[in-house]
Amino acid sequence: MNKKWEHKSIALAITLGVALSPVNLAGAAADGEPTFDLDQVVVTATKTEKKVKDVPAAVEVITKEDMDKKNIKRVADALTTVPGVYVRQTKGLMGSTDSITMRGFGSQKQILILMDGQPINDGYNGGVNLANIPTENIDRIEVIKGPASALYGSNAMGGVINIITKEKARQETIVRLGIGGQETITRSIFTSGSAGKLDYFITAQGTSADGYEAYEDYKTAIPGSDRARNPGKNGMDRKLYDGKLVYHPDENSKISLSGGDNRFKYFSENVADRGVRNENIWALNYERKLSGDSSLKVSYGEKEIESWYVSTSYSSTTNNVSSYSYTRNPSKTSQAEVQYNFRAGAKDLLTIGYTYRSEQSDSLAKTLTVASQGWNLAAATANSDNNIGGKTETKSFFIQDEHKLGDNTTLYLGGRYDDWRFYDGYTYGYDSTRKSYVTNNTPEGKADSFNPKLGLVHKVNDKLTLRSSIGRAFRAPNIYELAKDWESSSGVIYKSNPGLQPEKDINYELGCDYQIDKTLLARLNIYHTEVTDAIDKRTSTNSAGRTVSQFINSGEARVNGLEFSLNKRWSDSWNSFLNYTYTDAKVTESIAAPENVGKQMAAVPKNMFNIGFNYAKGPWQGSLTGNYVSETNDPSKQGQTGYGTYEAYFTVDTKVSYKLSENTAVSLSIDNLFDRKHYIYYVAQPRTTYLELTHKF
């Protein structure tokens, strides 16, 4: 997209924004529908169908309609304005490094991500590539904030995000075509329909980009660097295919089969840096309503990942390419679960269940040397070769009792027992003592964990609902942390630690929802979390002067947080939202890095603020959103700016849509409207326009 066209697009968007702006908000109608539906039914908070106002947790729901109002290209985009959730997008439209942190937990592996209730955190390091999830087939996203191990087990320390796909078929086909900055092209098709008792949903979505300047100031950041140190523009290609079949044998039961084949690759303009991440996922679910409130759910799912990447290393003296690193990380996870809900008297609804989860992964790392400067990977020769691998399995039992204390008060009491073990671990790498490559078996590791939770919901009146809870959560160590054991080409010794124990936390929380009137909703959550046995990387020097790196149970942390939000409907056409998040996340004890004690944890912003306006009337629809995030540097870089840091920023995004006909619409969106330059490790994406055409058949 050329600059002239881009400038015209910006002028058009601003003009439309002014034309659609509310001239008398104070005098707007006050009898519209609430902007946040507290009667909306969610399933993630209690593993049963409950209204938002009845669950003992802080819940946010993002509907497909909400996503259509904003410039949502990936799942991560939909979460940027949720209070308590920080979306770190270090490579803009690329999406290759999108990550979610929540409630003071600065790592993706401490947040459990579900797709239709099935965990999709990978088996190697617990991460999730959120960009590899199609958006067209999403019905809603349920965000449960706070520890949820009492129902969901490992990874759910900071919360749970459940991406729920469509299940009510319409006879429709939706085609989207988009073009935007950074040479972005998007095309997708979604079709759904019914054939007797069978509903079907099919999605194909593709996105390509070839113009992201991740290293705009690279030469300035590293004095003396030449073109070899500047990878140039980044590009990517993503193809997502997804399907779902839902069969209804009768009115009380359904069987669903879903699957996806998602392929992603990225590359750099000037160097060998590139990578591939292919994912295959499928799940089979059976649900049946029995007598009364009784129901049965049985599910099984698998996810396989095949990924590799190449990165470039440079000589410290000549700044020329000295070597390439090739890393391959295949993994497979599977999970089976059975859940039974039933009444035990007039006041108790019990949920019991059993879960079996297995993970396996292997990692291959090669160092390739080059004879001279260049970017020809084929000309490189192998210098070292390292492998690690292993398996984990977890057997779990959970129970929850929803007990009515009175007409307006409900007590939730539950807990989950997880029995976890690591086995079949191995390493293959160079042994400097034997002067040869050797294979070693990694000792087994095991642990168990019981995580209870107590929650209370009290309806003071029709307007005010109070919530309180106390609960424990944990995260079992992943294969990367347990098994990594090799010597790198730079001389660093990585040591495995099969004796790692799970991270743990305990959380205390108070919250309230206050429906001031039909048009104004206020929500407040205050919480305190204590973390123990935190897993961190310790770096030391051995007697031979070699650097040794190993994951250990390092220490403790404390998190105090507050989330406040207002949702207001000004008229039938206008509504707005405002929210603020304060997160004081401090390291209180650390064996790995004692210098970090008392400092804000990495990847956790202390302050976040979001504000937005939405408009819909006739054929027009528009949104304007502002997003502020304070710095999220690790403790050693706090206060620093520029390349390699995570600066504070405030950006504004906007989108305007117009219906050309009942079935055809065109939209123009702009990210970073005021072109605010900042760094999220790499330079963040500049002002980026995007034009999209949507047609329904």
Image: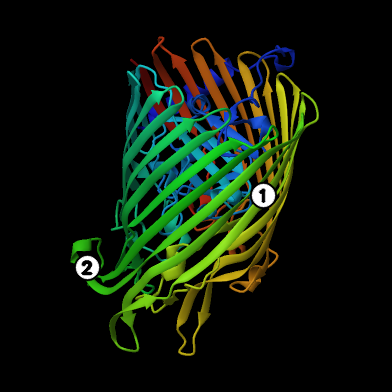
- Mark sitting on residue 380: 2
Asked if 63 appears above or below 474 in the picture, the reply is above
Callout 1 amino acid: Lys
- For disc 1, the marked residue is 453
Disc marking residue 640: none
Of 666 and 148, which appears nearest the observer?
A: 148
Circle 1 crowding by C-alpha within 10 Å: few under 14, some 14–19, many from 20: many
Q: Quadrant of residue 449?
A: bottom right
Q: Residue at x 56, y 44 (%)?
A: 352
Residue drawn at (48%, 25%) of the image: 68
Locate the C terminus and report the quarter of the image it occupies. Answer: top left
Element type at mark 2: loop
From the top left corner, tell me how far across and down residue 648 is, in percent.
Answer: 60, 49
Q: Is residue 451 above or below residue 536?
A: above
User: How many discs appear?
Assistant: 2
Image quadrant where one finds the N terminus: top left
**Quadrant of residue 50 within the rendered picture:** top right
Q: Give percent across and percent down for residue 324.
A: 30, 66
Q: Is residue 447 left or right of residue 443?
A: right
The percent position of residue 133, horizontal first and vertical second, equals: 40, 39
| Residue at (70% x, 14% y) in the render | 24
How busy is the neighbourhood of tag 2: few (under 14 within 10 Å), some, or many (20 plus)?
Answer: some
Colour mapping: rainbow
Task: Work out whether residue 3 or residue 603 is closer to the camera in this orientation and state it.
Answer: 603
Q: Are marks 2 and 1 in contact (CB under 8 Å)?
A: no
Spatial CA distance of label 2 from label 1 is 55 Å
Which of 192/622 is in front?
A: 192
**Residue 670 shows in this picture:** yes
Residue 236 rendering spot, x and y as whole percentages: 32, 44
Q: Amino acid at mark 2?
A: Ala
* Lateral position of residue 642 relative to residue 21, left or right: left
Q: Quadrant of residue 660?
A: top left
